[in-house]
Image (cartoon, coloured by chain):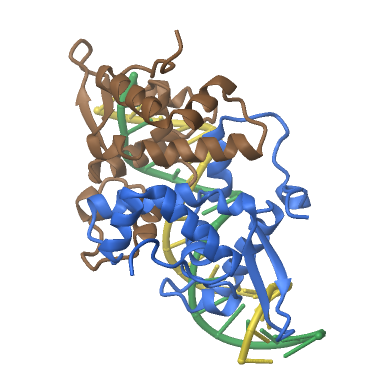
Chain colours: A brown, B blue, C yellow, D green
Amino acid sequence: MCHDAGMKATLTRQPRSLCPVNIAVEILGDRWTLLVLRDLMLKGRVTFKSMIEAEEGIATNILADRLSRLEAEGIVEKLPDEDDRRRARYTLTTKGLDLAPVLIHMMVWSATYYDTAAPPGEIDEMRRNRRRYLAAVRASAERSGPPERAGKR
Amino acid sequence: MCHDAGMKATLTRQPRSLCPVNIAVEILGDRWTLLVLRDLMLKGRVTFKSMIEAEEGIATNILADRLSRLEAEGIVEKLPDEDDRRRARYTLTTKGLDLAPVLIHMMVWSATYYDTAAPPGEIDEMRRNRRRYLAAVRASAERSGPPERAGKR
DNA sequence: CCGGATCCGTTTCGATACTG
DNA sequence: CAGTATCGAAACGGATCCGG
């Protein structure tokens, strides 16, 4: 069995309390987890397949591993698609949605200092009206679709 | 100077623009970089030695590598200590300080869902008055010391 | 002493091929 | 379609050395 992808039960963090940055790093500190969260939160990619098709090209075993870790942490929930049983849908829990501010500030920071492919209007919306943008993300997550451009339209 | 980042030969990012989450992940997405930033930003640890002494026990080669990457990105600046020449001081640039919201939201999220060792008052201050907390971080960075507890005391 | 650089064994990651 | 198995590559981390 590939490195503990399957032993989710044993993934329990030590009860001893840590610096909060430390905890976030244990969960988010790798090259893929945040991208998976972005897919779920902002891109409306909620199936294994759609995440595999994302431009970064995550490997199937890595995606499976990250999804199962996130599920073990209670950040995502996996539920079988009602229409198509072999398909699974991954959705963010409230705990997962609460990571939106982290993602958003990362995006704003990146767009401030680097040339990014993000629609400038969207970054502006994040910067200027973060609360409204967050509400839009949340609302879209309820429908498990991609977020509307808050405000605009 | 402080901002022509990314010109380190080994670290050249592709000029093609990426999803902003992607950029943040390339820079921050590993097990140590965020902890180093925390030391610089929140713990007042600005020397190599003091970071080595942090509880997590980063290895000297890893710390040296992360600091040089952060320097190459224009996130930290290295300058020799005026009093003691063999000692070096690492300080955050403006670009680095602009990552404070990311760190802070990570801490708030972690403290919300896990048992952490953070002083609850500090987390509350972050949650309730993030702007003031940010100002305190910024001000303390100017002095290169640990941030005061904004407001309280 | 301090801030690293280098070497090297070990752990973890991740691309590809494969399977239920 | 949604994962596993395999195996090479990369990252990690301990020890050690070194210039200032």
Q: Measuring 28% from the left and 27% from the top, which residue is drawn there?
A: A90
Relative to the observer, which residue lies in front, A64 or A33? A33
Question: In the figure, A87 relative to A23: above or below?
Answer: above
Q: Measuring 60% from the left and 34% from the top, which residue is drawn there?
A: A111
Relative to the observer, which residue lies in front, D17 or A29? A29
Where the N terminus of chain B falls, by quadrant?
Answer: bottom right
Where the C terminus of chain B falls, by quadrant?
Answer: bottom left
Question: In the figure, A114 relative to A117: above or below?
Answer: below
**Is residue B60 at all visible to an observer of this figure?**
yes
Farthest residue toward the top? A153
Q: Measuring 56% from the left and 64% from the top, which residue is drawn there?
A: B141
Number of numbered discs on residues: 0
Question: In the figure, A28 relative to A21: above or below?
Answer: above
Residue A88 in picture, x, y percent from top left: 26, 23
**Is residue A46 at all visible to an observer of this figure?**
no
Residue B10 in picture, x, y percent from top left: 74, 51
Q: Tell me: B152 left or right of A38.
A: left
Residue B105 in picture, x, y percent from top left: 39, 47
Relative to the observer, which residue lies in front, B153 or B75? B153
Q: Residue A100 appears in which quarter of the rendering?
A: top left
Q: Residue B2 appears in which quarter of the rendering?
A: bottom right
Q: Measuring 46% from the left and 66% from the top, which residue is drawn there?
A: B147
Residue B54 in picture, x, y percent from top left: 45, 75
Q: Tell me: B92 left or right of A63.
A: right
